[in-house]
Structures are given as C-alpha cells and as structure tokens.
Image: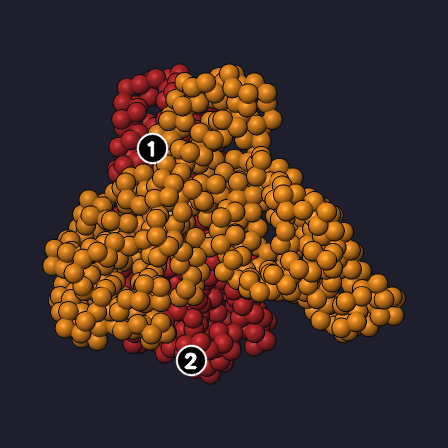
Chain colours: A red, B orange
C-alpha cells in the first residue's frame, strides 16, 4: 500500500481525501464545535485551559496526552487573546507533528516472496474485513496475494474470508473450523511459496490481550512460521478499533511485547469515535500506523495521513 | 504505568480513611483524583463531572466532616453514588437473563450495536441461557445481510448451542427476514425470537433507518444495545444515538473479561437511563453473567466482589466434599489430599487470576503475586507434586525426607526447592487450620475477611478466607 498509486489521477486522490476528511469531520464535529464555543474571543486562562484539556480527553486522547498538549499551549499563549481558529490550527499542527513520524504506509517487500503479514487483534476489531480490503488494494497494485483463514475459532470466520477471496480473486488457504491455527499458517506459507505469491496475509482469531493461553497460541503460530522462514512473519499488524478508549494502550503494549507487533491499522474511523487514543499511542509506542478503515466498502481502507487525521480531528478546514 | 481504576481509587481512599479528620480541601483533593481515575477508566466526561458534583454535594453538605470516620463516610458516598449510577442495588432481581419476556409468545428480542461489538456471539449466549435456565424455546435469526458470512455465523452458533436458527434465504432484506422470523416463531411455537442485526454506525442514517423499520415491523419487547467494555468516550454518543433512534431497553456489555476498566458501562447507563442487563465474560457460549451494580461498584472501589466469589464457590464446590473437609477440620486433621482437593477446586473456580479479581484489595496483592510468580501454572505444578506422592506420604507428610523429596520432584517434573515450598505451605496451612479450629465458628468469620474493613487493607496470613491455603496471600 504505497502512499498512492502513481498511476492514479489527482481526481481519485481528492476523492479519497475528501472521503477521509468527511468521515473524520463527522466524528470530530463535536470536538471542533466544543473548541469554538470555548475560544471565540476569549482570554486563554486557567479555566479555558482546563476546558480545553477536557475536550481533548473527550476525544479519547487520554489524560496524559491531553495534559501535555495543554501545557504546551499554556506556555506559548497563556493570557493572550486567542481565537477559535488559532487554537484549532495550532492544536492540529501539534497533533500532526506528533503523528507525522508514525504515518508509514504498508509496502510489501517484493524480495521476500512471500512477504508474510500476520494480522492480530482483539475480538471484533475488524481483522478479517481489513485483510479483505488490504488484499484488494495489493492485488490492484499488481501483487500476487494469498490469504490464510487463520481464524479457526469464530463461527463462519473462514467463510467470511473465503467470500472476500472470491470477490478479489485471491486463493484462500483454509481448514475446518477448530483446526490448529499454527498448522494452517505453516501450510499457507508453503502454498504461498509454491504459487510464487508476493504477499501472504494471515488472519487470526480475535483474542483479548490478557488471555495468556490465547496469546501463547499466537506465539506458536509465529514459531511455526519461523520453521519455514526464519524471518517470517515480516510484519505483525495489530488491528485496532477506533472506538476503543484508553485500553488501546494496554492492548498495543501487550500485543507488542508478546508477538512483536510492527504496525497498526485503525478501523471504524468513519463513526462518531474520534480515535484520539492514536495520539497517546504515538507517544507511548511510536508504532507505524499503516492504514485507517473509513467504511465497509472494499475500497474504504486508506493510507494514514497525519495531517488529514489531525485536521479532521479538530475540524480545521 | 497502567494502574487499574481499582488500585488508583484504593490509594485515594486509603489516604482518606487513614485520616482522623477531614477538611473540605481534603475531600476536594480526593475528588480530583476520583475524576482523573474515572476519566482514565473511559467514563465519559459529562458523566464524570455530574458524578463528582453529586458526591461533592453529599460529602460536603452532610455531617460527614464532623463524624468519627469521615474518610469512610466519603468512601461510602462514592460507593453509593456509583451503585446508583450503575443501576441501583438490587435492580437485578432475578437470577435469569433479566430480560422482560412478559408478552404473548413469540416474544421478539432485538440486538443492535456497532460493528464488532459482539452482537452475534451475545445472541448465541442469550439463547443458551434462555434455553437452559428458563426452559424457553428459542429461535434465532440474523438480519445481517451486509457482512460476508454473518448469517452463516449465527447458523453455526445455533448448531453449537442446540438452538434453532431461521433458514437463510439469500437476498432477503432485513425487514422481511424479521417478519418471516416472527411468523415462523408463531407457527412453530417458539417462546422467544432473537433478532441479530447488522453492525452499524450510529451516524449511518440509512442503516439506522433500516433498524428503526425492523423495530416498527416486529415491535421487539426488548431492544438490547450490545457494546464493547473497551469503548472509550464515544460510548455516550453511541448509546444516545441508538436510544433515540430505536429505543434501547437494556445494555449488554461484552468483553468484560478483558482488562479494560469498563467506564463505558457507567457512561451508557447514565446517558440512556437503561439498565445494563448482561455481561459477556468469555468466548464460550455459557460465558454470560447477570449484571449486579452493587457488586461492580464494589469491584471498582477496591472492595472486591465477595458475593460473586461466594456464589461461584457454591456452584463449584460440591457440598459433600466441603462437609467432609469440615469434619476433618473439626478433628484437626488436614492432609495433603485435602490440600490437593482445594487446589483442584481453585482451578475449577476459574483459577487464581479470576478469583483474585473478585477479592478485596487485590490490585496490590496481584502485583505481589506477580512478583512472587504465583499464578495458575504454579497451582497446577503443586497439584502435580502432590500427585507424585504416595498415599502414605499424603496422609503423613512428616515422613517425606530428602530422598523422597528428590523422587517426588523427579516424578512431578519439578525441583526439590519447589517440593520444599509446597510442604512449607502445607505446614502453614495446617497450623492455620488448627488455629481456626480453636477460634470456632465466630472466629472464622472474623479471621476470614479482614480486607473488607478498609480497601487496600492487608491480606496476609489467613486473609484469603477459609478456602485457600494461607501461603497464597503471603509476601515472599
């Protein structure tokens, strides 16, 4: 998933950008509106700063990130007359600066053949859907993609991925429900090699990060993959639901510690959830954010843009 | 770094309860901490503000500051308010699903929520519960025509659970499916029809209109909003939007078995005024629990969930075994067989970690246990050690000398120090049993639950209650 296909016209670029903006601004209109209400021709005093901090907290930025941002603000602008525009612009700028280093699109390494990507996350975060969307994008970019239906636990998860495979024309390696996920991953890697695939996307069952047994199962998948390719999986992508609150910090930390997560995909950003926890995550973990999900359509997976996200978050034009 | 809300509040209240007299400033300071703690637990900001305001009014306005134990008074007010906000003590009268099914069968029950909140799994769990506990004949129907294989997912769940699902007709729109489900339910004599809808965003006009249409068509007796316990500040928006559009009658909170602090429960309850009816606590189909506001509030405040613990103990420990143990205890006899049995019961009750969540003052102890590497694995090893002993050794542990210890260690795949540790623990336990015996029943009750007096209170020695060997609570 490169920044944008070079063949794509500006037209398309604008349209996805607009969609992202629309999605995000729907979710942030409240936050933006709140700040306007506070700061229209007003002195930036303690009370105003406290309200600002609370607004950031309301966007799921978390107490720590909200305090940091507010403190930054008070240092430079305390006591000055500030307008709504200034506050929003400056805040968006700060947030974009924070997020800029983590905005790294996912680019498969063609030398790997296949580039193995393990997709992990808690239940219901949107792993299977993300794989479907990601696979479509990669296929469109000319990669040969194989999918592995590694969620052998949830009812009909395998069928769900198979339907995606049919839609986009990717082979799907699957076994019956209840089969060993590690064994399936092993088979999938073998088949992907035989077929000369560029990318292998492995789905996994959703699991809560505090379930030691299930996390160990995931570690086993990785161990087994390493028997075929010591470097596999080349990427471990954690799919994170944007509606998640501060628990996202724990989620990412635990998954990273146990299965060495290399990047994030944030889903459901088209809702009223603000996904502000990304800001806290960027500070705490600094993991790349590869893409964001902004809808249910097959094309609704977008590269993560720090500026667009920050602007959308604060409702800056 | 990630203190739980519980440990955070334990600290705050620990400070408060230790003080003799409280000034208004003390209360203010404590409430600031409460505010941050609740925010970090993802309770929505307006709800937090409202909550803190109410507590402040009560704490400052009353006799609190002049009373003998002002700290505890404040804690009590916070606790009472929390219970109130979560739905009021005893709001959950019955032990069943807490669902209102008092209508002419088939009674329609609809589940709504965001994508991935756990609607389909919850649907299966509710069906199992209605079938097993309330002897209802349940039909499930999936109205999710959007996500690939969603209808199939419910069909598979139905097979696993032994619950009927409406046959899938490809291409049928949701409203028609709902109508067909009700007709089938009436014709085939079902008591309850569970309608599992597609996940949708609260701001998606078209989809919200669709679910409103389904609601009009079947007039569900219960419309349950299924929400993830990990939800952040957005919980209020979601709850509000769904409540306005489809009239939520209750909330099902899922993934409560995660380590999220669950502030969403408070937010959604406060915004909709609807009760939280059920909690999803695991991936298995029976992992659904009734919601008890008073217990959850106590858990949040670090007072533990003793009632749940006792209930779980009652469910798992066979009365006969317990009696046998009690008789043995009376005679002052407690051997390694008894200890092994207790350890096994412990694993049956969901393992140490699950139990610890229910016990008072646990965040600190959990940390201590983590440091001492006490976990469920250790319990299993201990059972293995005891299993590697001969019958004689189990009854008369005093015969276990060096060479026997080596054999036991080899037999159980452990090491001699581990065997020693277990024997030491056993010695401590039997010593305590003797003490308990001397104290008599009244003493047992007092010695059993010392943690209740003050949150964060010590849990050493015999603090784990009668059921556990005392070694578990000890700092090493």
Instruction: Locate residue B450, reporting x and y percent.
Output: 62, 40
Residue at the spot 37% in from the left edge and 26% down from the top edge: B54
Can residue B357 be seen in this snapshot? Answer: yes
| Residue marked by disc 1 | B46
How many labels sit on residues? 2
**Front label number (2 vs 1):** 1
* Left or right of residue B339: residue A203: left
Q: How far apart are marks 2 and 1 (CA)?
A: 48 Å
Residue at the spot 32% in from the left edge and 63% down from the top edge: B134
Q: Nearer the viewer, residue A1 or A31?
A: A31
* Mark 2 Cα-neighbour bin, 10 Å: few <14, some 14–19, many ≥20: some
| Residue marked by disc 2 | A175
Vertical placement of B128 versus B356: above or below? below
* Mark 1 Cα-neighbour bin, 10 Å: few <14, some 14–19, many ≥20: some
- Pointer 2 and pointer 1 on the same chain: no
Q: What element carries label 2?
A: loop
Q: Is mark 1 on a helix, strand or loop?
A: helix
Which of the 4 image quadrants contains residue A86? top left
Instruction: Locate residue B109, reporting x and y percent.
Output: 23, 59
């Amino acid at each position: 998933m490169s920044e944008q296909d070079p063949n794509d016209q500006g037209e398309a670029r604008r349209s996805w950008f607009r969609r992202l903006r629309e999605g995000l601004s729907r979710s942030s209109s409240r936050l933006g509106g709140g700040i306007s209400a506070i700061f229209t021709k007003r002195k930036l005093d303690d009370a105003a700063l406290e309200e600002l901090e609370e607004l950031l907290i309301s966007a799921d930025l978390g107490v720590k990130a909200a305090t940091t941002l507010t403190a930054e603000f008070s240092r430079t602008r305390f006591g000055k007359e500030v307008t709504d525009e200034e506050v929003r612009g400056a805040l968006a700028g700060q947030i974009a600066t924070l997020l800029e280093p983590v905005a790294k699109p996912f680019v498969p390494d063609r030398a790997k053949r296949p580039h193995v990507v393990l997709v992990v996350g808690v239940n219901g975060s949107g792993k299977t859907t993300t794989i479907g969307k990601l696979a479509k994008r990669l296929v469109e970019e000319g990669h040969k993609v194989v999918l592995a239906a590694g969620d052998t636990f949830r009812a009909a998860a395998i069928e769900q991925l198979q339907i995606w495979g049919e839609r986009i024309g990717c082979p799907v390696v699957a076994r019956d429900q209840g089969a060993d996920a590690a064994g399936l991953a092993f088979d999938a890697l073998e088949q992907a090699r035989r077929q000369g695939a560029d990318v292998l996307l492995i789905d996994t069952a959703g699991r809560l990060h505090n379930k030691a047994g299930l996390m160990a199962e995931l570690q086993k998948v990785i161990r087994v993959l390493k028997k075929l390719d010591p470097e596999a999986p080349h990427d471990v992508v954690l799919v994170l639901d944007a509606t998640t609150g501060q628990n996202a910090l724990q989620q990412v930390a635990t998954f990273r510690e146990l299965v060495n997560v290399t990047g994030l995909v944030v889903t459901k950003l088209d809702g009223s959830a603000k996904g502000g926890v990304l800001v806290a995550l960027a500070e705490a973990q600094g993991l790349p954010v590869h893409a964001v999900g902004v809808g249910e359509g097959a094309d609704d997976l977008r590269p993560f843009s720090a500026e667009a996200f920050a602007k959308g978050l604060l409702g800056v034009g | 770094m990630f203190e739980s809300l519980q440990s955070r509040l334990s600290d705050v209240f620990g400070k408060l309860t230790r003080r003799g007299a409280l000034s208004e400033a003390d209360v203010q300071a404590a409430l600031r901490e409460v505010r941050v703690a609740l925010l970090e637990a993802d309770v929505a900001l307006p709800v937090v503000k409202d909550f803190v305001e109410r507590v402040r009014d009560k704490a400052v306005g009353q006799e609190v500051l002049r009373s003998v134990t002002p700290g505890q008074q404040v804690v009590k007010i916070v606790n009472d308010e929390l219970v109130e906000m979560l739905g009021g003590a005893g709001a959950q009268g019955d032990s069943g699903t807490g669902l209102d099914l008092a209508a002419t069968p088939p009674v329609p029950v609809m589940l709504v929520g965001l994508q991935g909140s756990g609607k389909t799994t919850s649907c299966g769990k509710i069906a199992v519960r209605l079938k097993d506990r309330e002897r209802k004949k349940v039909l499930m129907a999936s109205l999710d025509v959007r996500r690939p294989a969603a209808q199939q997912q419910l069909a598979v769940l139905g097979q696993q659970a032994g619950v009927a699902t409406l046959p899938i007709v490809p291409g049928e729109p949701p409203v028609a499916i709902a109508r067909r489900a009700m007709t089938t339910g009436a014709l085939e004599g079902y008591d309850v029809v569970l309608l599992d809808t597609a996940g949708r965003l609260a701001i998606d006009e078209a989809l919200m209109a669709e679910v409103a249409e389904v609601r009009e068509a079947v007039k569900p007796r219960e419309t349950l909003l299924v929400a993830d316990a990990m939800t952040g500040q957005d919980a209020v928006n979601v709850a509000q939007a769904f409540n306005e559009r489809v009239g939520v009658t209750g909330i099902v909170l899922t993934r409560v078995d995660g380590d999220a602090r669950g502030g969403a429960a408070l937010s959604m309850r406060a915004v909709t005024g609807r009760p939280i009816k059920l909690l999803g606590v695991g991936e298995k189909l029976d992992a659904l629990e009734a919601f008890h506001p008073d217990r959850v509030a106590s858990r949040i405040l670090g007072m533990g969930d003793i009632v749940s613990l006792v209930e779980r103990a009652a469910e798992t420990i066979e009365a006969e075994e317990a009696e046998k143990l009690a008789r043995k205890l009376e005679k002052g006899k407690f051997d390694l067989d008894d200890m092994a049995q207790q350890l096994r019961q412990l694993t049956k009750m969901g393992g140490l970690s699950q139990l610890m969540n229910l016990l008072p003052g646990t965040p600190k102890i959990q940390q201590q246990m983590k440091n001492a590497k006490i976990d469920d694995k250790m319990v299993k090893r201990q059972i293995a050690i005891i299993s590697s002993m001969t019958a004689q050794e189990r009854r008369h542990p005093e015969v276990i000398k060096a060479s026997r210890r080596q054999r036991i260690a080899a037999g159980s795949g452990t090491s001699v120090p581990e065997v020693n540790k277990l024997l030491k623990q056993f010695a401590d336990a039997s010593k305590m049993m003797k003490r308990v015996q001397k104290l008599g029943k009244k003493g047992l009750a007092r010695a059993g639950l010392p943690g209740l007096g003050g949150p964060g209170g010590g849990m050493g020695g015999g603090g784990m209650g009668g059921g556990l060997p005392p070694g578990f609570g000890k700092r090493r």
